[in-house]
Amino acid sequence: MSGLCILPGEAAVLYREIQWARAHLIADHSPCQLYEKRTHIALKSHIEKLISYQASVNKGAEKGAQLQLF
């Protein structure tokens, strides 16, 4: 099972993680994406929401903590 994993820290690292997520999660088979059939546009919107949520969680994380969202 794969998910979005972002390590809080420098902005450049966060940016690379978000770019990776955008490139790979569209083809992901995590439970949240198998919940219902989605069009490509709806799926991309869903992924953007996951990335946005993860970024908001990361703001309160301590540096070095590893956060995962499935």
Image (cartoon, helix red, strand yellow):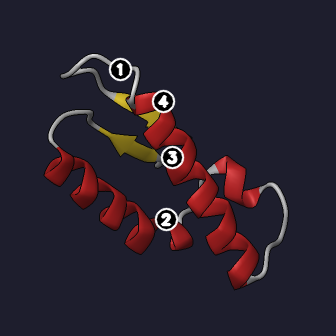
Q: Nearer the viewer, mark 3 or mark 1?
A: 1
Under mark 4, the amino acid is Val
Of labels 2 and 1, the one closer to you: 1
From the top left corner, tell me how far across and down residue 65 is, in percent.
27, 20
Mark 4 or mark 3: which is in front? 4
Q: Secondary structure at mark 3?
A: loop
Mark drawn on residue 57: 4
Left or right of residue 12, residue 52 in this image: right
On the image, numbered disc 2 is attached to which residue? 25
Tag 3 residue: 1
Q: Which residue is mark 1?
A: 61
Label disc, if present, on residue 17 of the rendered structure: none
Find the distance from the CA under tag 2 to the CA under tag 4.
18 Å
Label 4 to label 1: alpha-carbon separation: 7 Å
Image position of 9 with respect to 22: above or below: above
Mark 3: amino acid: Met
Residue 48: quadrant of the picture: bottom right
What amino acid does circle 2 point to?
Leu
- How many residues crowd around disc 3 within 10 Å: few (fewer than 14), some, or many (20 or more)? few
Instruction: Please tell me which of labels 2 and 4 falls first in the chain.
Output: 2
- Position of 8 relative to 50 (above/below): above
- Among the two numbered marks 2 and 1 on one chain, the one whose residue lies closer to the N terminus: 2
Dot 2 surroundings within 10 Å: few (below 14), some, or many (20 or more)?
many
CB atoms at circles 4 and 3 under 8 Å apart? no
Residue 69 percent coordinates (x, y): 52, 38
